[in-house]
Image (spheres, rainbow, N blue to C red):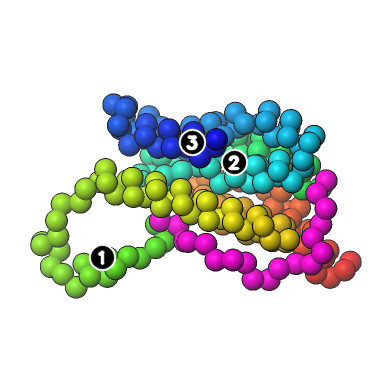
Amino acid sequence: MIDRNVRVMDRKVSGETGDDPLDYTTDDYARLVCRHSKIVNALAVVDNTLAFNLVISMADASHTDLDTTLEMCGEDPGETARYFQSLDNLLLPLIKYRQQPAELCWQLLQVPVRWSQRRTGSQDAKSDEDPDEWSEPDYERQYWEKCNYEHNRRIARRWREIVDDWITVALSDLKDERDYLDLYGITGFFPESIAEFEAIRMQMSTGV
């Protein structure tokens, strides 16, 4: 459901619909994700764990394509922060009502790195070539390669939902997203939930 909506937004950004890609920013992704808040509240009554996993997936999909161009960050960071605050408010009670794991996991399953952080064999080969001989890049193809890669990376991250230590998994994912957004000057990503996770981990680690 969320992935499908993100793919629709990706198509708009790519310009396939005839829109100007710069008409869409990370605010649009955050706004799109927040539309599922009512579903989270309804689901929490039936299954707190499923509601929790849904919000973590929403957090992952609440921003996209900041590597494409700086304009994708939007002109008002405060608007994005307000959407993030709404999501943070959704997640916090779900954390408090969920049963703590029996023990903490200190080594998580590996998932692919971000598109912008990976290094391909073609990049290594090009480093030894004459730049004047490089072919003209196909930006539309590269854009969709990136979208597909990030889609698969998002799915891979959800595989970690099967581990018992949901605290370490969620904290790792949220801090990874927060640090990525910080690079672009976008702040306010789940501060209260991250603080709650860290407090729980500290309490479980020290027994205090």
Q: Element under label 1?
A: helix
Identify the residue shown where x is 67% and y is 57%.
162
Specify the amino acid type for callout 2: Met
* Residue at 46 percent of width and 48 percent of height: 151
Residue 52: image x %, image y %? 71, 44
Q: Earlier in the sequence, mark 1 or mark 3?
A: 3
In the rendered image, residue 148 lying in the magenta stretch gets the answer: no
- Marked residue nearer the N-terminal end (1 or 2): 2
- Above or below, 118 against 180 in this view is below
Tell me the SS state at disc 3.
Answer: helix
The image shows residue 165 at horizontal and vertical percentages of 73, 61
C-alpha separation, residue under disc 1 versus residue under disc 2: 33 Å
Looking at the rendering, in which quadrant would you find the N terminus? top right
Q: Position of residue 196 (x, y in %)?
A: 76, 52
Q: Residue furthest right?
A: 208
Relative horizontal placement of residue 181, taking residue 53 as reference (left or right)? left
Q: The disc labelled 3 sits on which kind of residue?
A: Arg
User: Is residue 175 visible from the viewing direction of this image?
Assistant: no
The answer to whether residue 198 is seen in the rendering is: yes
Against 27, is 197 above or below? Answer: below
Q: Quadrant of residue 122?
A: bottom left
Dot 3 corresponds to which residue? 4
- Between tags 3 and 2, which lies in front? 3
Q: Which mark is residue 122?
A: 1
Alpha-carbon distance for marks 3 and 2?
12 Å
Magenta stretch in the rendered image: 97-115
Q: Amino acid at mark 1?
A: Ser
N-terminal label among 3 and 2: 3
Verify whether residue 113 appears in magenta. Answer: yes
Q: Residue 68, image x and y in percent?
A: 36, 46
